[in-house]
Image (cartoon, rainbow, N blue to C red):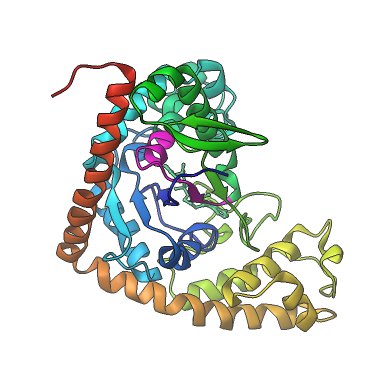
Amino acid sequence: MSEFAPRILSGIQPTGNLHLGNYLGAVKRFVPLQDEYPSLFCVVDLHAITAQLVQDDLAGQTRSIAAAYLAAGIDPKRAIIFNQSRVAGHTELAWIFNCVARIGWMNRMTQFKDKAGKDRENASLGLLAYPSLMAADILVYRATHVPVGEDQKQHLELTRDIAIKFNNDFSARIAGAGLGTPIRMGEETVQGYFPITEPLIGGPAARVMSLRDGTRKMSKSDPSDLSRINLTDDSETIAKKIRKAKTDPDALPSEIDGLTGRPEADNLVGIFAALAERSKQEVLAEYGGRQFSEFKPALVELAAEALGPVTGEMRRLIADPGHIDAVLRDGGERANEIAEATMRDVKTIVGMLQG
Ligand code: TYM
Protein backbone atom coordinates (compact mmCIF):
# COMPACT_ATOMS: atom_id res chain seq x y z
CA MET A 1 0.00 0.00 0.00
CA SER A 2 1.37 3.40 -0.87
CA GLU A 3 0.24 6.97 -0.63
CA PHE A 4 1.06 7.71 -4.26
CA ALA A 5 -1.77 8.89 -6.49
CA PRO A 6 -2.82 5.83 -8.48
CA ARG A 7 -1.63 5.74 -12.07
CA ILE A 8 -1.59 2.95 -14.66
CA LEU A 9 1.10 2.26 -17.21
CA SER A 10 1.56 -0.66 -19.56
CA GLY A 11 3.47 -1.32 -22.75
CA ILE A 12 3.63 -3.63 -25.75
CA GLN A 13 6.55 -4.33 -28.05
CA PRO A 14 6.03 -3.53 -31.73
CA THR A 15 7.55 -6.81 -32.93
CA GLY A 16 5.38 -9.08 -35.06
CA ASN A 17 1.64 -9.43 -35.02
CA LEU A 18 -0.39 -9.00 -31.89
CA HIS A 19 -2.00 -12.30 -30.91
CA LEU A 20 -4.91 -13.37 -28.76
CA GLY A 21 -2.65 -13.64 -25.68
CA ASN A 22 -1.62 -10.00 -26.00
CA TYR A 23 -5.23 -9.01 -26.51
CA LEU A 24 -6.86 -10.99 -23.70
CA GLY A 25 -3.96 -10.85 -21.23
CA ALA A 26 -3.26 -7.15 -21.73
CA VAL A 27 -5.02 -4.81 -24.22
CA LYS A 28 -8.61 -5.81 -23.43
CA ARG A 29 -7.92 -5.41 -19.72
CA PHE A 30 -6.55 -1.87 -20.23
CA VAL A 31 -9.89 -0.59 -21.49
CA PRO A 32 -11.90 -0.51 -18.23
CA LEU A 33 -8.88 0.74 -16.26
CA GLN A 34 -8.82 4.04 -18.18
CA ASP A 35 -12.15 4.90 -16.54
CA GLU A 36 -10.80 4.33 -13.06
CA TYR A 37 -7.28 5.79 -13.15
CA PRO A 38 -5.10 8.17 -15.12
CA SER A 39 -3.53 5.76 -17.61
CA LEU A 40 -0.64 5.62 -20.06
CA PHE A 41 -0.32 2.99 -22.78
CA CYS A 42 3.02 2.83 -24.47
CA VAL A 43 4.38 1.21 -27.63
CA VAL A 44 7.87 0.19 -26.53
CA ASP A 45 9.84 0.71 -29.71
CA LEU A 46 13.17 0.93 -27.85
CA HIS A 47 12.57 -2.54 -26.42
CA ALA A 48 11.78 -3.79 -29.92
CA ILE A 49 15.42 -3.45 -31.03
CA THR A 50 16.94 -5.37 -28.11
CA ALA A 51 16.59 -8.83 -29.66
CA GLN A 52 17.01 -7.80 -33.29
CA LEU A 53 18.50 -4.43 -34.10
CA VAL A 54 17.47 -3.99 -37.73
CA GLN A 55 13.69 -4.15 -38.02
CA ASP A 56 11.85 -4.22 -41.35
CA ASP A 57 9.12 -1.75 -40.48
CA LEU A 58 9.42 -0.45 -36.95
CA ALA A 59 7.25 2.61 -37.66
CA GLY A 60 4.51 0.48 -39.24
CA GLN A 61 4.60 -2.02 -36.36
CA THR A 62 4.44 0.86 -33.89
CA ARG A 63 1.36 2.25 -35.63
CA SER A 64 -0.28 -1.14 -35.62
CA ILE A 65 0.06 -1.51 -31.81
CA ALA A 66 -1.34 2.02 -31.42
CA ALA A 67 -4.19 0.97 -33.74
CA ALA A 68 -4.88 -2.04 -31.50
CA TYR A 69 -5.09 0.21 -28.44
CA LEU A 70 -7.55 2.49 -30.22
CA ALA A 71 -9.57 -0.35 -31.79
CA ALA A 72 -9.93 -2.09 -28.42
CA GLY A 73 -11.55 1.05 -27.04
CA ILE A 74 -8.81 3.09 -25.38
CA ASP A 75 -9.80 6.74 -25.65
CA PRO A 76 -6.76 8.87 -26.55
CA LYS A 77 -8.38 11.93 -24.99
CA ARG A 78 -8.54 10.32 -21.58
CA ALA A 79 -5.62 7.89 -21.61
CA ILE A 80 -2.21 8.75 -23.03
CA ILE A 81 -1.16 6.61 -26.01
CA PHE A 82 2.42 7.17 -27.15
CA ASN A 83 5.62 5.54 -28.32
CA GLN A 84 8.51 5.17 -25.91
CA SER A 85 11.33 6.61 -28.03
CA ARG A 86 9.56 9.96 -28.19
CA VAL A 87 9.96 10.57 -24.46
CA ALA A 88 13.63 10.95 -23.55
CA GLY A 89 12.94 10.42 -19.84
CA HIS A 90 12.64 6.66 -20.41
CA THR A 91 16.23 6.24 -21.55
CA GLU A 92 17.60 8.81 -19.09
CA LEU A 93 16.01 7.07 -16.15
CA ALA A 94 16.98 3.67 -17.54
CA TRP A 95 20.62 4.71 -17.41
CA ILE A 96 20.33 5.67 -13.77
CA PHE A 97 18.55 2.36 -13.10
CA ASN A 98 21.40 0.54 -14.87
CA CYS A 99 23.55 1.90 -12.07
CA VAL A 100 21.00 0.92 -9.39
CA ALA A 101 20.34 -2.64 -10.60
CA ARG A 102 22.96 -5.38 -10.27
CA ILE A 103 24.20 -7.56 -13.13
CA GLY A 104 23.17 -10.63 -11.12
CA TRP A 105 19.57 -9.43 -11.07
CA MET A 106 19.55 -9.18 -14.86
CA ASN A 107 21.24 -12.55 -15.36
CA ARG A 108 18.46 -14.23 -13.41
CA MET A 109 15.65 -12.99 -15.70
CA THR A 110 14.04 -15.96 -17.42
CA GLN A 111 13.04 -13.85 -20.43
CA PHE A 112 16.69 -12.90 -20.94
CA LYS A 113 17.76 -16.53 -20.66
CA ASP A 114 15.08 -17.61 -23.15
CA LYS A 115 15.80 -14.87 -25.66
CA ALA A 116 19.59 -15.01 -25.39
CA GLY A 117 19.57 -18.80 -25.71
CA LYS A 118 22.87 -20.65 -25.46
CA ASP A 119 25.02 -17.88 -26.86
CA ARG A 120 24.59 -15.37 -24.03
CA GLU A 121 27.90 -13.63 -24.65
CA ASN A 122 26.62 -12.64 -28.05
CA ALA A 123 23.29 -11.15 -26.89
CA SER A 124 23.04 -7.38 -27.06
CA LEU A 125 23.75 -5.39 -23.93
CA GLY A 126 20.29 -3.90 -24.50
CA LEU A 127 18.71 -7.34 -24.11
CA LEU A 128 20.42 -7.78 -20.74
CA ALA A 129 19.39 -4.28 -19.61
CA TYR A 130 15.84 -4.69 -20.99
CA PRO A 131 14.19 -4.94 -17.54
CA SER A 132 15.90 -1.79 -16.37
CA LEU A 133 14.35 0.15 -19.28
CA MET A 134 11.02 -1.46 -18.44
CA ALA A 135 11.34 -0.27 -14.83
CA ALA A 136 12.06 3.21 -16.20
CA ASP A 137 8.95 3.05 -18.44
CA ILE A 138 6.88 2.51 -15.34
CA LEU A 139 8.66 4.64 -12.77
CA VAL A 140 9.27 7.72 -14.92
CA TYR A 141 5.50 8.19 -14.44
CA ARG A 142 5.61 6.87 -10.88
CA ALA A 143 2.91 4.43 -11.98
CA THR A 144 1.38 2.49 -9.11
CA HIS A 145 -0.30 -0.31 -11.09
CA VAL A 146 0.79 -2.22 -14.18
CA PRO A 147 -1.66 -4.51 -16.00
CA VAL A 148 0.21 -7.29 -17.81
CA GLY A 149 0.04 -11.00 -18.61
CA GLU A 150 1.58 -13.56 -16.28
CA ASP A 151 4.85 -13.72 -18.26
CA GLN A 152 5.83 -10.20 -17.11
CA LYS A 153 5.64 -11.01 -13.39
CA GLN A 154 9.38 -11.39 -12.91
CA HIS A 155 10.10 -8.09 -14.67
CA LEU A 156 7.66 -6.34 -12.35
CA GLU A 157 9.31 -7.86 -9.29
CA LEU A 158 12.57 -6.43 -10.56
CA THR A 159 10.90 -3.04 -11.03
CA ARG A 160 9.93 -3.17 -7.36
CA ASP A 161 13.49 -4.14 -6.38
CA ILE A 162 14.88 -1.19 -8.33
CA ALA A 163 12.42 1.23 -6.69
CA ILE A 164 13.22 -0.13 -3.23
CA LYS A 165 17.00 0.12 -3.76
CA PHE A 166 16.77 3.64 -5.21
CA ASN A 167 14.55 4.75 -2.30
CA ASN A 168 16.98 3.19 0.22
CA ASP A 169 20.22 4.33 -1.37
CA PHE A 170 19.00 7.91 -1.64
CA SER A 171 16.72 8.03 1.40
CA ALA A 172 18.56 10.93 3.08
CA ARG A 173 18.67 12.99 -0.13
CA ILE A 174 15.01 12.27 -0.90
CA ALA A 175 14.03 13.47 2.58
CA GLY A 176 16.45 16.43 2.38
CA ALA A 177 14.93 17.63 -0.87
CA GLY A 178 11.42 17.20 0.54
CA LEU A 179 10.61 14.72 -2.25
CA GLY A 180 9.57 11.75 -0.12
CA THR A 181 6.13 10.18 -0.20
CA PRO A 182 5.06 7.77 2.55
CA ILE A 183 5.10 4.14 1.46
CA ARG A 184 3.58 1.48 3.65
CA MET A 185 5.71 -1.67 3.62
CA GLY A 186 4.16 -4.28 5.89
CA GLU A 187 3.95 -2.75 9.37
CA GLU A 188 6.40 0.00 8.58
CA THR A 189 5.95 3.31 6.76
CA VAL A 190 9.01 4.59 4.92
CA GLN A 191 9.56 7.65 2.74
CA GLY A 192 10.46 7.05 -0.87
CA TYR A 193 10.50 8.77 -4.23
CA PHE A 194 9.33 5.85 -6.34
CA PRO A 195 6.19 3.81 -5.57
CA ILE A 196 6.44 0.05 -5.12
CA THR A 197 4.38 -0.80 -8.17
CA GLU A 198 1.68 -3.45 -7.99
CA PRO A 199 1.28 -5.81 -10.92
CA LEU A 200 -2.29 -6.33 -12.11
CA ILE A 201 -2.19 -9.89 -13.41
CA GLY A 202 -5.36 -11.88 -13.54
CA GLY A 203 -8.50 -13.04 -15.19
CA PRO A 204 -9.03 -16.29 -17.08
CA ALA A 205 -6.49 -15.32 -19.80
CA ALA A 206 -3.45 -14.16 -17.82
CA ARG A 207 -1.50 -16.85 -19.65
CA VAL A 208 -2.98 -17.88 -22.98
CA MET A 209 -1.30 -21.03 -24.26
CA SER A 210 -0.44 -22.26 -27.75
CA LEU A 211 -3.33 -23.84 -29.63
CA ARG A 212 -0.97 -26.65 -30.64
CA ASP A 213 0.52 -27.37 -27.22
CA GLY A 214 -1.26 -26.39 -24.03
CA THR A 215 1.98 -26.42 -22.05
CA ARG A 216 3.60 -23.63 -24.10
CA LYS A 217 2.73 -19.95 -24.06
CA MET A 218 1.01 -18.47 -27.12
CA SER A 219 3.80 -16.40 -28.59
CA LYS A 220 4.76 -14.22 -31.54
CA SER A 221 7.91 -16.26 -32.02
CA ASP A 222 6.29 -19.72 -32.31
CA PRO A 223 7.19 -20.98 -35.81
CA SER A 224 3.72 -22.48 -36.27
CA ASP A 225 1.10 -19.89 -37.20
CA LEU A 226 -1.55 -22.44 -36.20
CA SER A 227 -0.37 -22.05 -32.61
CA ARG A 228 -1.81 -18.56 -32.27
CA ILE A 229 -4.70 -16.35 -33.33
CA ASN A 230 -3.37 -13.10 -34.74
CA LEU A 231 -5.40 -9.93 -34.54
CA THR A 232 -4.84 -9.62 -38.28
CA ASP A 233 -6.46 -13.03 -39.01
CA ASP A 234 -9.83 -12.98 -40.75
CA SER A 235 -12.75 -14.90 -39.26
CA GLU A 236 -12.24 -17.89 -41.57
CA THR A 237 -8.61 -18.26 -40.49
CA ILE A 238 -9.61 -17.93 -36.84
CA ALA A 239 -12.30 -20.61 -37.31
CA LYS A 240 -9.77 -22.95 -38.95
CA LYS A 241 -7.24 -22.47 -36.14
CA ILE A 242 -9.85 -23.17 -33.46
CA ARG A 243 -11.10 -26.27 -35.31
CA LYS A 244 -7.52 -27.55 -35.55
CA ALA A 245 -6.65 -26.66 -31.95
CA LYS A 246 -5.29 -29.62 -30.00
CA THR A 247 -7.71 -31.16 -27.49
CA ASP A 248 -8.12 -34.43 -25.62
CA PRO A 249 -10.85 -37.03 -26.20
CA ASP A 250 -12.84 -36.38 -23.01
CA ALA A 251 -15.93 -34.25 -22.48
CA LEU A 252 -15.53 -30.94 -20.65
CA PRO A 253 -15.75 -31.20 -16.85
CA SER A 254 -18.37 -29.31 -14.84
CA GLU A 255 -15.90 -28.06 -12.24
CA ILE A 256 -12.58 -26.19 -12.49
CA ASP A 257 -10.77 -29.04 -10.69
CA GLY A 258 -11.59 -31.27 -13.64
CA LEU A 259 -9.30 -29.15 -15.85
CA THR A 260 -6.22 -30.19 -13.88
CA GLY A 261 -3.85 -32.14 -16.09
CA ARG A 262 -5.81 -31.09 -19.21
CA PRO A 263 -3.85 -28.03 -20.40
CA GLU A 264 -5.49 -27.75 -23.82
CA ALA A 265 -9.02 -27.95 -22.37
CA ASP A 266 -8.05 -25.46 -19.66
CA ASN A 267 -6.69 -23.07 -22.29
CA LEU A 268 -9.77 -23.16 -24.54
CA VAL A 269 -12.08 -22.69 -21.56
CA GLY A 270 -9.95 -19.74 -20.41
CA ILE A 271 -10.08 -18.16 -23.87
CA PHE A 272 -13.84 -18.66 -24.03
CA ALA A 273 -14.28 -17.13 -20.57
CA ALA A 274 -12.13 -14.07 -21.37
CA LEU A 275 -13.88 -13.45 -24.69
CA ALA A 276 -17.32 -13.84 -23.11
CA GLU A 277 -16.32 -11.81 -20.02
CA ARG A 278 -17.35 -14.68 -17.79
CA SER A 279 -15.46 -16.85 -15.30
CA LYS A 280 -14.16 -20.31 -16.23
CA GLN A 281 -16.59 -21.76 -13.69
CA GLU A 282 -19.52 -20.10 -15.45
CA VAL A 283 -18.36 -21.49 -18.79
CA LEU A 284 -18.07 -24.99 -17.31
CA ALA A 285 -21.49 -24.69 -15.72
CA GLU A 286 -22.86 -24.30 -19.25
CA TYR A 287 -20.58 -26.65 -21.20
CA GLY A 288 -19.68 -29.31 -18.60
CA GLY A 289 -20.38 -32.79 -19.99
CA ARG A 290 -20.28 -31.60 -23.62
CA GLN A 291 -17.71 -32.72 -26.19
CA PHE A 292 -15.23 -30.45 -27.97
CA SER A 293 -17.22 -31.11 -31.14
CA GLU A 294 -19.92 -28.91 -29.58
CA PHE A 295 -17.68 -26.52 -27.66
CA LYS A 296 -15.40 -25.56 -30.55
CA PRO A 297 -18.16 -24.25 -32.86
CA ALA A 298 -19.47 -22.16 -29.95
CA LEU A 299 -15.95 -20.79 -29.45
CA VAL A 300 -15.62 -20.04 -33.18
CA GLU A 301 -18.85 -18.08 -33.11
CA LEU A 302 -17.90 -16.21 -29.96
CA ALA A 303 -14.42 -15.37 -31.29
CA ALA A 304 -15.87 -13.97 -34.52
CA GLU A 305 -18.37 -11.89 -32.56
CA ALA A 306 -15.86 -10.58 -30.01
CA LEU A 307 -12.81 -10.09 -32.24
CA GLY A 308 -14.47 -9.09 -35.53
CA PRO A 309 -15.21 -5.48 -34.55
CA VAL A 310 -11.71 -5.00 -33.08
CA THR A 311 -9.82 -6.45 -36.03
CA GLY A 312 -12.04 -4.56 -38.48
CA GLU A 313 -11.44 -1.28 -36.68
CA MET A 314 -7.71 -2.00 -36.55
CA ARG A 315 -7.61 -2.45 -40.32
CA ARG A 316 -9.55 0.79 -40.80
CA LEU A 317 -7.19 2.71 -38.52
CA ILE A 318 -4.03 1.30 -40.10
CA ALA A 319 -5.27 2.63 -43.43
CA ASP A 320 -5.13 6.15 -41.94
CA PRO A 321 -1.56 6.48 -40.59
CA GLY A 322 -1.88 10.27 -40.33
CA HIS A 323 -4.49 9.90 -37.62
CA ILE A 324 -2.42 7.39 -35.64
CA ASP A 325 0.65 9.60 -35.89
CA ALA A 326 -1.32 12.56 -34.53
CA VAL A 327 -2.51 10.46 -31.57
CA LEU A 328 1.06 9.35 -30.83
CA ARG A 329 2.43 12.88 -31.13
CA ASP A 330 -0.18 14.30 -28.78
CA GLY A 331 0.30 11.41 -26.34
CA GLY A 332 4.07 11.87 -26.48
CA GLU A 333 3.75 15.52 -25.52
CA ARG A 334 1.50 14.77 -22.57
CA ALA A 335 3.71 11.89 -21.41
CA ASN A 336 6.79 14.08 -21.73
CA GLU A 337 5.43 16.66 -19.31
CA ILE A 338 5.09 14.06 -16.58
CA ALA A 339 8.43 12.41 -17.38
CA GLU A 340 10.33 15.71 -17.40
CA ALA A 341 9.04 16.59 -13.94
CA THR A 342 10.20 13.21 -12.64
CA MET A 343 13.63 13.59 -14.25
CA ARG A 344 14.12 16.99 -12.63
CA ASP A 345 13.42 15.42 -9.23
CA VAL A 346 15.62 12.41 -9.95
CA LYS A 347 18.54 14.60 -11.03
CA THR A 348 18.13 16.67 -7.86
CA ILE A 349 18.13 13.47 -5.77
CA VAL A 350 21.17 11.99 -7.52
CA GLY A 351 22.96 15.33 -7.27
CA MET A 352 23.36 16.32 -10.90
CA LEU A 353 23.73 19.94 -11.93
CA GLN A 354 20.83 21.23 -13.96
CA GLY A 355 19.21 24.47 -15.01
P1 TYM B 1 4.99 -8.13 -24.91
O1 TYM B 1 5.06 -7.13 -26.01
O2 TYM B 1 5.70 -9.43 -25.07
O3 TYM B 1 3.49 -8.48 -24.58
C1 TYM B 1 2.50 -7.47 -24.40
C2 TYM B 1 1.52 -7.88 -23.32
O4 TYM B 1 0.89 -9.11 -23.66
C3 TYM B 1 1.01 -10.04 -22.59
N1 TYM B 1 1.12 -11.40 -23.14
C4 TYM B 1 0.31 -12.40 -22.79
N2 TYM B 1 -0.73 -12.47 -21.95
C5 TYM B 1 -1.38 -13.66 -21.85
N3 TYM B 1 -1.02 -14.77 -22.54
C6 TYM B 1 0.02 -14.74 -23.41
N4 TYM B 1 0.36 -15.83 -24.11
C7 TYM B 1 0.74 -13.52 -23.57
N5 TYM B 1 1.81 -13.15 -24.32
C8 TYM B 1 2.02 -11.84 -24.04
C9 TYM B 1 2.29 -9.62 -21.87
O5 TYM B 1 2.32 -10.10 -20.54
C10 TYM B 1 2.19 -8.12 -21.95
O6 TYM B 1 1.35 -7.61 -20.93
N6 TYM B 1 8.23 -6.43 -21.52
C11 TYM B 1 6.90 -6.25 -22.06
C12 TYM B 1 6.67 -4.87 -22.64
C13 TYM B 1 6.91 -3.73 -21.71
C14 TYM B 1 6.09 -3.33 -20.61
C15 TYM B 1 6.72 -2.15 -20.08
C16 TYM B 1 4.94 -3.85 -20.04
C17 TYM B 1 7.95 -2.84 -21.79
N7 TYM B 1 7.82 -1.89 -20.82
C18 TYM B 1 6.17 -1.49 -18.98
C19 TYM B 1 4.39 -3.18 -18.94
C20 TYM B 1 5.02 -2.02 -18.42
C21 TYM B 1 6.70 -7.25 -23.18
O7 TYM B 1 7.62 -7.75 -23.75
O8 TYM B 1 5.41 -7.44 -23.53
Against 42, is 197 above or below? above
Against 338, is 203 above or below? below
Q: Is residue 125 visible?
A: no
Quarter of the N terminus within the rendering: top right
* 135 in magenta: yes
In screen coordinates, is 260 left or right of 294? right
Q: Nearer the viewer, residue 48 or 292?
A: 48
- Residue that appears at 26% across and 70% down: 317
- Residue that appears at 25% across and 38% down: 341
Q: Nearer the viewer, residue 238 or 30?
A: 30
Against 93, is 261 above or below? below
In screen coordinates, is 273 left or right of 183? right
Query: Percent position (x, y) of residue 154?
Result: 59, 37
- Residue that appears at 36% across and 63% down: 69
Q: Is residue 331 visible?
A: yes
Query: Percent position (x, y) of residue 147?
Result: 51, 53
- Residue that appears at 40% across and 69% down: 72
Span shown in magenta: 134-149
Quarter of the C terminus within the rendering: top left
Query: Percent position (x, y) of residue 284?
Result: 77, 76
* 266 in magenta: no
Query: Percent position (x, y) of residue 289?
Result: 85, 80
In screen coordinates, is 113 left or right of 308? right
Q: Quadrant of residue 187?
A: top right
User: What number of labels is visible?
Assistant: 0
Q: Nearer the viewer, residue 33 or 19?
A: 33
Q: Quadrant of residue 270?
A: bottom right
Q: Quadrant of residue 54?
A: top left
